Image (spheres, rainbow, N blue to C red):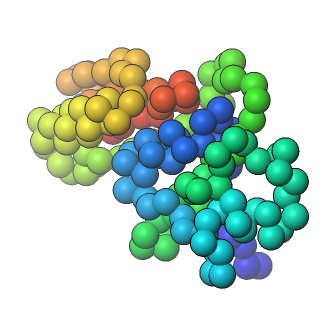
Amino acid sequence: MEMELQLTIDCSDPRRMVEFWTEALGYVPEPPPDGHATWRDYWQAMGVPEEELPSGAGDLPESIVDPSGRGPRVWFQHVPEPKTVKNRWHFDLKVGGGRAVPRDVRAQRVDATVRRLVAAGATVVRVRDEPDTDLYAAALRDPEGNEFDVV
């Protein structure tokens, strides 16, 4: 069976989420489909009514893609309601290199990524520094409060 995977994330500000998650995942904003100068042009050609497009939407993408083509497309779908509860799933950004890498090196890699993502708009929830279990990881929230881990 052939299948494409797309991850859809409900949010209030798709453009801000595109900006943050391209930085976090190393993805790129998805260009509009061939034959369309902007995403607004594409959605209008598809028959989406103007009143369903957020103000100013369409000039910037609401989706990101893996430049290597391996990862799933991520679409940030505008919804009117805010996030109200903890995520039932989350991203783990595995930047440390795994348990074969010395713990101090993993910690440096995690800390560098955390600093970069905080500068991009993330908030640190907690850092788990547990030498007895060889764990070093950080829990963060994206600009809209969605939880994710850096390990």
The front one of 126 and 17 is 17
Q: Is residue 70 visible?
A: yes
- Residue 3 % position (x, y): 72, 73
- Residue 84 % position (x, y): 69, 18
- Residue 145 % position (x, y): 54, 24
Q: Quadrant of residue 34?
A: bottom right
Q: Residue at (42%, 34%) from the top-left corner?
A: 149
The front one of 33 and 1 is 33
Q: Quadrant of residue 88?
A: top right
Left or right for 115, reference 22? left
The quadrant of the picture occupied by the N terminus is bottom right
Q: Residue at (69%, 60%) from the top-left corner?
A: 40
Left or right for 67, reference 38? left
Above or below 15: residue 1: below
Q: Quadrant of residue 138?
A: top left
Number of marks present in the image shown? 0
Left or right for 52, reference 76? right
Q: Residue at (29%, 47%) from the top-left corner?
A: 95
Q: Residue at (17%, 48%) from the top-left corner?
A: 101
The front one of 143 and 131 is 143
Above or below 28: residue 140: above
Left or right for 104, reference 100? left
The quadrant of the picture occupied by the C terminus is top left
Above or below 132: residue 69: below
Q: Is residue 137 visible?
A: no
